[in-house]
Amino acid sequence: MEVITYSSDLVKPSTPTPTNLRFHKLSFTDELAPTIHVPLILYYPPPPKGVTDKLGNISDHLKVSISKTLSDFYLLSGRHIRKLSLIDCNNQGIRYVVGKANVKLSEIIESENGLVANIVNNFLPCEIGEADEIDDPMLSVKVTTFECGGFAIGMCFAHRLSDMGTMCNFISNWASRSNGSYEYENFSPIFNSAVYFPQRGLPELDLRVPRSSLGVKNAVRRVLFKGKVIQEMRKMVGFDANGSRRPSKIQLVVALLWQAFVRMDQENNGQSKASFLIQPVGLRDKTVPELPSNSFGNFWGLATSKLGPGEGDELDFQGFFNILRESIKKRARDCAKILTHGEEGYEVIINPYLEANKNIADSEVNFYLFTCWSKFPFYEADFGYGKPIWSSTGSLPVQNLVIMMDDHEGDGVEAWVHLDENRIKELEQDSHIKAYALM
């Protein structure tokens, strides 16, 4: 497969940012975010007949509508001044790339899973890596058309400025402008993160992200858990359909993969190392009072789960699930204190970050990051050409990372597992994983 880039330029807001909004201070939750581009790709089938006649060339139409969207989301057109921990909203613009692939979209969607993980980065506008320098755009976009008439919209957001909630609010705004349904009240961002979380000069979460993926030796697999399999996993933890609240499909998948990672470690070393697992948890709907869903910035904390050396070697699947469930329940309880308990509320956010940074640097601890992108409205993003038939992340230059997304049907999970090459091969041969997942 070959993707030819036809153009790459900067798109600025259709309305310049007022001078009184020139500088935006980051919040301390922005300060804590890892230094990386966050990749997301939406894939669209050929538009219905007559749509392109009405809206015009796809890439040109999207370019005009994104320029209008940037007038609302003007921070994305600025640049990060690292030493001052602020965004210079100078209307410099986002990177906008247009390309064409010499394959049909169906060849991507229906290809083998390993191949998918290796090729999707071709639909991204930039390399995934460290993203905090003064010349790094806060957002880059690439529109790639396929031979069949379908297209992909690949996006890379700087995590320094935005979490997935912010990204989805931006996408909804852009899509509504593009399809003609835009209403300011529904999609406008609120720049309130520094009001709730003033700066404290904190270090970011250090995921050891390189500037370039060149020479990085890790492998990525898309591991599929279908809805029917999720139901079987629920029965494994004693779920009664007529009883208590059903277990989260995400926590079931995290438990199964975490157990596999510990089992692989035990088989290689006789006893598993200490294991430390973190899961980002959105804050907007968990604080008291709740924060607006269109709050712009990073509004998330960390739920942590841990095992000492050898502690996971005798645990069954339900044991791993119980540890994770209690971690998430505790995090939800603690989040209620964030806005009302002063310094204690601040510690609810900062202490897990400090613990995570300590463990990620400890060679005696296996550190894992599981991030959940479930329930985000990726499949609702209609730019006027119809809704996407698939969404994906990319292949990141980070090990011991799992990104979990809903499948197109909504009841399954696509887990993008990043490990070193040897452990990916071991995971592929794990009998428990093979029993429940497609790889």
Image (spheres, rainbow, N blue to C red):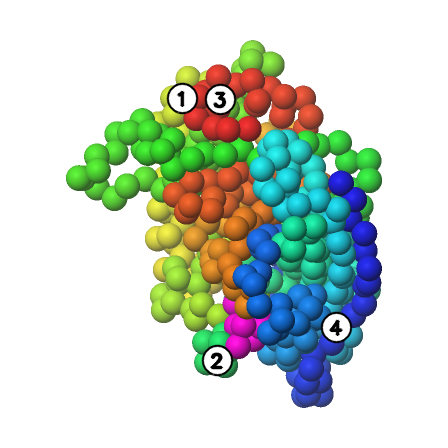
Q: Which callout, 4 or 1, points to the residue nearer the camera?
A: 4
User: Which secondary structure, mark 3?
Assistant: helix
Of pointers 1 and 3, the one earlier in the residue sequence: 1
Decide if residue 131 is in sight here. Answer: no
Residue located at (70% from left, 40% from top)? 119
Q: Mark 3, residues whose alpha carbon is within 10 Å: few (<14), some, or many (≥20)?
A: few
Q: Residue at x 21, y 38 (%)?
A: 241
Identify the residue at the far left of this view: 242
Give the answer, above or below, for where 406 lies relative to 87: above
Residue 398 picture location, percent across and down: 68, 40
Q: In this picture, is 339 found above or below 236?
A: below
Can you identify the residue that label 4 sits on?
11
| Viewer-side residue, 337 vs 269 | 269
Q: Could you say which quadrant of the image residue 133 lies in?
A: bottom right
Q: Are marks 3 and 2 in contact (CB under 8 Å)?
A: no
If you read the primary sequence from the N terminus, does the residue marked by circle 3 or circle 2 appear first?
Answer: 2
Q: Is residue 175 magenta?
A: yes
Front one among 15 and 323: 15
The magenta region covers: 172-180
| Prevailing secondary structure of the magenta residues | helix
> Which one is earlier in the sequence, the residue at label 4 or at label 1?
4
- The three-letter amino acid code for the residue at tag 2 is Glu
Quarter location, residue 220: top right
For residue 434, the mark is 3
Q: Name the residue under label 1.
A: 315
